[in-house]
Image: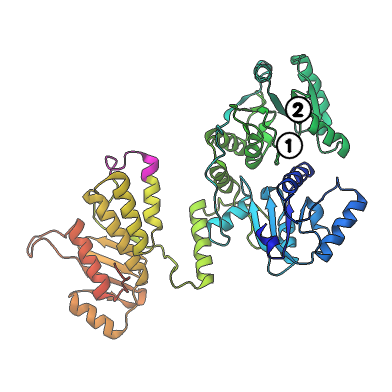
Amino acid sequence: FKAVQDGKQVAVAVPTTLLAQQHLATFSERYAAFPLKVRGLSRFTSKKEAEEVLTGLADGTVDVVIGTHRLFASDVTFHDLGLVIVDEEQRFGVEHKEHLKQLRAHVDVLAMSATPIPRTLEMAVTGIREMSTIQTPPEDRQPVLTYVGPYEDAQVVAAIRREMLRDGQVFYLHNRVESIEKAARRLADLVPEARIAIAHGQLPESVLERVIIDFWERQFDVLVCTTIVESGLDIANANTLIVERADRLGLSQLHQLRGRVGRGRERAYAYFLYPPDLPLTDAAHDRLATIAQHTSLGAGMAVAMKDLEIRGAGNLLGGEQSGHIAGVGFDLYMRMVSEAVTEFRHDPASPVHQSVRIEIPVDAQLPPEYVPEERLRLQMYRRIADATDHEALRQVREELLDRFGPMPEQAERLLTVASLRNLAGRAGVTEIHMTGRQMRLSPVSLPESGQLRLKRLFPDTLIKAPISQILVPVPTTARVGGQPVRNDDVLEWLRTLLIDGLNAPQEVGS
């Protein structure tokens, strides 16, 4: 609406004709009181109407167009396109999304999805694209009760009859067009009292539209369908989903299908079934385990992150939207891309974080008695590891104090070690290792004046210039027979060594 007010045109791309019709009806209803021209463009659009829409887009008389892949055809030209909205983004290819952006150099793109494709999600979490998440569900919406298990006729019959007892409707997904009628006949034999309809993408458009409308008007109890219903169908009375061969579907598809039920106030049920006599592949097992684990409202983000981890992020500059991450591991890959983005932007406020390895005898940890739950403990360790400046560490400290109370000595030391790690990184040091009574730091390259200063401040320091390494004697608890200092004392001494001896730059406030 804001874009049209500013004189721009808006294109809304959706993956299916059914969703295009649904959006067109919704947009037309909401904009009825305003002088906006909203039109649709899909294979359901007649030839004459399509020509009128194309002419209107070219001369600027059509403000908002809602369409399927038809929008990407070569004969579609815009007068002044300002905003592209891609709904159900995971259903579009790279070429489609790039094509719309190339129509004009300065086009805002809003991509919406409950489960973003790995390539898009990875662009968001590494900072290439901006991302915002909607966490608040509609009022009175309840999580869908999810069951994953082997297929059993008795369970399917019980699920359908239970839904019919409360005057509800059922989606039964059989994703094979050639055998979908056979599946419908089998259901009719199992539940003879159920009124059953069939919907799939190869039906003539008029027949498909009629079936969906009849189902929406409750003339059928069970809709035997393919994944054509995956995107955007909003039928509040359908509250049971049964999926045959769930092991063949992708993680994003499983989550999107589950979103077709539970859209009203009634409790919804989703059954993801697989053949009892066939072994599951590792990937299928991971997908089904993930969908069973993430059942809360707004779980799409967690599902998409797991999908990214399972499938990989694809090619940022090419066409692959998923690809193998196993070669380097998920966390390392994400960090590598994040560092590359920061370096490309030349952002002085966000220096590329070097991996600094510190091995010194200190008791630095988050004790289980301080953070009892293992998942939260690992989460906080990750937050500390990702804190690359003083402000980030300050926020972590405040969060620990707020959530878990006063910090024990070990936790304080852990934050001190993190601060030293950042200090060492700014000095170019990537390894600090205490061996016996000496502290080894590398790589360290000092000019002659710096070497003289280091030896004056820290006598008996050994400088190995050819391998960019220094060995500095660690203070002891006593002049004769004492042991090297530990814990807080060695941390304070190391800080002094980095600042005074190696001239490490300090942050403001640190």
| Tag 2 secondary structure | strand
- Magenta highlight on residue 491: no
138 vs 180: above or below: below
Q: Residue at x 85, y 59 (%)?
A: 54
The span from disc 2 to disc 1 (Cα, nearest Å) is 10 Å
Please say whether residue 172 is visible from this viewpoint: yes
Quadrant location of the C terminus? bottom left
Q: Secondary structure at mark 1?
A: helix
> Which residue is located at x 78 percent, y 17 percent?
188
* Residue at which label 2 appears: 223
The span shown in magenta is 367-377
10 Å crowding of disc 2: few (<14), some (14-19), many (20+): many
Indicate the position of residue 220 as horizontal and vertical percent values.
Answer: 77, 24
Q: Residue at x 29, y 41 (%)?
A: 368
Q: Earlier in the sequence, mark 2 or mark 1?
A: 2
Looking at the image, the residue that sits furthest to the left is 480
Task: Judge left or right: residue 461 versus residue 248.
Answer: left
Residue extending furthest toward the front? 33
Q: Main secondary structure of the magenta part?
A: loop
The numbered disc on residue 67 is: none
Q: Amino acid at mark 1?
A: Val
Query: Is mark 2 in CB contact (under 8 Å) with mark 1?
Result: yes
Q: Position of residue 82 (x, y in %)?
A: 70, 64
Q: Is residue 113 left or right of residue 403?
A: right
Where residue 475 sits, quadrant-wise, is: bottom left
Q: Amino acid at mark 2?
A: Leu
Residue 206 location, x and y as percent?
88, 37
Dot label at residue 229 = 1
- Nearer to the camera, 258 or 5: 5
